[in-house]
Image (cartoon, rainbow, N blue to C red):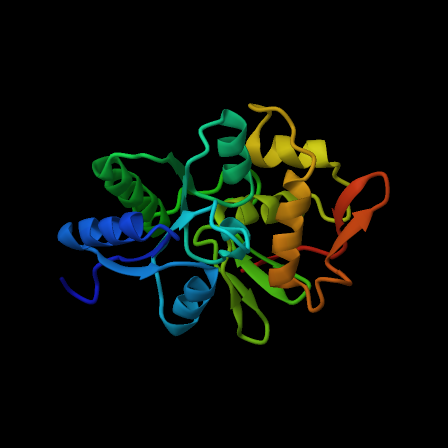
Amino acid sequence: MTDTAPHILVVDDHRDIRDAVTRYLEKNGMRATPARDTVEMDAALKAGRFDLIVLDVMMPGEDGLSAAEGPPILMLSALAEETDRIVGLEIGADDYLVKPFNPRELLARIKAILRRADRPEPMAGSLGGRKLGFAGWVLDTDTRALTHEEGRQALLTTAEFKLLTAFLERPRFVLSRDQLLDITRGRTAEVFDRTIDNQVSRLRRKIETDATQPKIIATIRAGGYSLAADVWAIG
């Protein structure tokens, strides 16, 4: 195993599952670091770089998915309801696997996510292949890199990237929650009232100076949300 092998963070409060997944990934050429809760997960994320998080979302304490930012996320959950899967994907996970699962399927899904991360699909629509400036930030829509003028970077999940580009395509236009669901996910599932609110909150924490008093993504009473900034093409 080399230092260039994909590094996976395995977060699960069940030791048997955590250790079994860690050993299986290492046996198949990946580096794997176990974490038993979100405290250990946060410490690991601060200490090193990971290519993907395998995350149990039913851990006690802080909700696992709400704590994860940056690397792609493969959710593990004992929940098998379709609505639970849809909500998980809409609020930021890249894939979802129900326990108990076949380790070979887990490995296949991890490899698929890593391939997409290495070669992100070109963005469709009017913003594809462009760099866009807004409110001190620059978004490269090909690489999905989001960089502030001061040099810091914000790592976006797939859901956050889709939401941000929905706003960038329609600056200063009021978008309802239903419209944002249509744009970012397509109306393939029933609407969940808090889905877009959760996504907006996550995105604000990454791009706003003070997420409690947002200046970039404004809340419109009885309306929805709006990007309160101009957008311009770079290069």
The quarter of the displayed image where residue 125 is located: top right
Q: Is residue 69 above or below residue 17?
A: below
Indicate the quadrant containing the N terminus: top left, top right, bottom left or bottom right.
bottom left
Using residue 190 as the reference point, say whether residue 41 is left or right of it. left
Horizontal placement of 104 versus 212: left or right? left
Decide if residue 147 is in sight here.
yes
Which residue is at the front of the view, 122 or 103?
Answer: 103
> Residue 20 location, x and y as percent?
23, 49
Q: Judge by depth and name the residue closer to the eye, 235 or 134.
A: 134
Q: Quadrant of the C terminus?
A: bottom right
Query: How many numbered marks does the figure carry?
Result: 0
Q: Residue furthest bottom?
A: 150
Quarter of the image where one finds residue 37:
bottom left
| Residue extending furthest toward the right | 221
- Image: 140 above or below 210: above
| Relative side of 227 to 90, left or right | right
Which residue: 71% across, 67% down?
210
Work out whether 128 lies above or below 99.
below
Name which residue lies at 43% across and 54% down.
143
The location of residue 148, given as percent across then percent down, is 58, 69
Residue 218: where, in percent of width, then height?
77, 53
* Occupied quadrant, residue 108: top left
**Near-viewer residue (40 or 228):** 40
Is residue 169 visible to the viewer in this orientation of the structure?
Answer: no
Instruction: Name the residue: 57% across, 40% down.
Output: 126
